[in-house]
Image (cartoon, coloured by chain):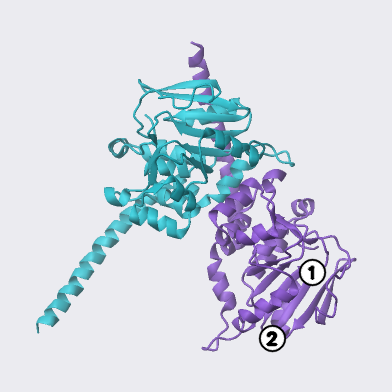
Chain colours: A purple, B cyan
Amino acid sequence: MSADASPKRERTGSDSAAKRGEVLFELPIGTKGQLICTRPKDKVYLITFSTILLALDIIETRYDAGVVITTSGIEKFYSNGLDLEHASFTPGFFPDTLYALWRRLLTYPMPTIALLNGHAFAGALMLAMMHDYRMMNPHKGYVCLNEVELGVPLRPPMTSIFRQKVSAQTYRKLVLEAARYKALEAFKEGIVDWLGGLDEALAYVDELKLVQKAGKGMNGKQVYGDLKREMWRETIDYLENFGAEDGRDFMIQARRKREREVAEGKVKVWEAKAKL
Amino acid sequence: MSADASPKRERSGSDSAAKRGEVLFELPIGTKGQLICTRPKDKVYLITFSTILLALDIIETRHDAGVVITTSGIEKFYSNGLDLEHASFTPGFFPDTLYALWRRLLTYPMPTIALLNGHAFAGALMLAMMHDYRMMNPHKGYVCLNEVELGVPLRPPMTSIFRQKVSAQTYRKLVLEAARYKALEAFKEGIVDWLGGLDEALTYVDELKLVQKAGKGMSGKQVYGDLKREMWRETVDYLENFGAEDGRDFMIQARRKREREVAEGKVKMWEAKAKL
């Protein structure tokens, strides 16, 4: 089952297939979906997805080290985010599927670019944040984290990635205000890094020599993935130690319950005095 | 005993009582002080304080979810900060009184605004940082952390909240330079969020729809406090696990003593060689 809930439709092809380069491989998703991996230029792999774990494995083991760009086959959305019902009722969904995907991206041994062709809300924005860079379509789409409006808490890895990658003020606006950002504001706040589409992404790949960053360094070792694992250590620890979180959640809930009982008691005492 | 040491005087009333809204309740503080909670508009609670824990409990258990604004009854200061003598000589002061207050604010299930009507130094600024937002009088008062000048160390939760909420450069200026910020500079550095008084705060409450943020989300659950607890996890952990800090402090002191002895030894050896 896909890690996100983009509707499983065929790509509506706003970029011509030729521009996206030679097709390297295709993976079926369920009965109706499809993932296509193309190569728009040498050592740049473009995954048009709704799940990408196997694609990432194929690229790492069968192709030269380079840069991975992910984008959506659906024009309106980078991703729809989590299918909350599916996520809540599928045992092991979070650790086995979602966290596995995020952990893989966050530590992937090649530069990763999320090419936001459209909206990225909640889980979709989190997915984008797990990439090294975010490119956004300047004319289309919003990003936001609307959990406070949904009444859904954010789990530790979800909030941790923002704490690590954006400023405290932006973090607060995203989490506590569910602010909806258009591309230009998202760019100013550092939520996305660049504005444009695939062509601009490829230009940045050249400018920043990102393909070379994935290669072996002068000592013969490739360290890109190790560097990322250490940089984003806090989030990775949460992604890997989700078991500890359940215990912590339980203790927090129990403590909150006790605190509310104590607060209620104190207020009753105050009310009783006030009546005297 | 109050958690801070604002002189226990009556409010000198620079804002007219009427503007501050209907009085919901009043709490005596010691023999001379007073806390007043008013409602300047629907679901906005204004606490004029020197202690606020019980007020926060009353609001949470007896009133509709909304927004809490705290400000001082003394014209010159938001708060004087810690009464260091009292704090040092009252057993359990830090965990039972001060940390309890900070923890409560940091995880309070409604948006909180610190309305800085005047100076906020040291403990007063820390208290303000435990709120979600800070509004400062543009014409009056300074904020700073002057512990380095007092020769007093900052305990983990004190320094942690700044590390989480301001940039590294601002953090360093505050802690290591005891920089005194007037309102406009504090605003530019992100220490305070807005400039103005109560009227402006109420406008932001409307603009950002803060009252609604405290309400139930579409899932039927109210998650504002949970989101905050997760966001500011590092500081909340320090506030809750102060016991571990005492052991750590002791070990650090012991290690520093050993390191200085070793350093002294090495320098003596070098001096002896230099004389040959």
User: Residue A86: x, y in percent?
Assistant: 79, 54
Density class for disc 2 (Cα within 10 Å; few <14, some 14-19, many ≥20) is some
Residue extending farthest front: B139
Q: Nearer the viewer, residue B237 or B83?
A: B83
Query: Mark 1 vs mark 2: which is more N-terminal?
Result: 1
Give coordinates of residue A224: x percent, y percent.
58, 78
Report, in whole angstroms, how far the alpha carbon at label 1 lies from the one at label 2.
20 Å
The one of A200 and B220 positioned closer to us in this rendering: A200
Q: Looking at the rendering, which quadrant does residue B117 occupy?
A: top left
Is residue A263 at least partly visible in the picture?
Answer: no
Mark 1 crowdedness (10 Å alpha carbons): few <14, some 14-19, many ≥20: many
Q: Classify A86 as above or below A75.
A: above
Q: Chain of mark 1?
A: A
Apparent side of residue A242 relative to residue B183 in the rendered image (left or right): right
Residue ID for mark 1: A49
> Relative to residue A57, is residue B28 drawn left or right?
left
Q: Position of residue A121 (x, y in %)?
A: 72, 55
Do the residues at discs 1 and 2 belong to one chain? yes
Residue type at mark 2: give it.
Answer: Asp
Q: Amino acid at mark 1?
A: Phe
Which label belongs to residue A64?
2
Which quadrant is the C terminus of chain B positioned in?
bottom left
**Residue sitting farthest toward the top:** A276
Output the chain of dot 2. A
Q: Decide which of A200, B56 is in the foreground and name it.
A: A200
Which mark identifies residue B33?
none
Furthest-left residue in view?
B276
Location of residue A153 in the rendering, given as x and y in whole percent from the top left corner: 65, 47
Of A230 and B2, nearer the camera is: B2
In this rendering, is residue A192 above or below B21? below
* A143 relative to A109, above or below: above
Q: Residue at x 57, y 59 (%)?
A: A166
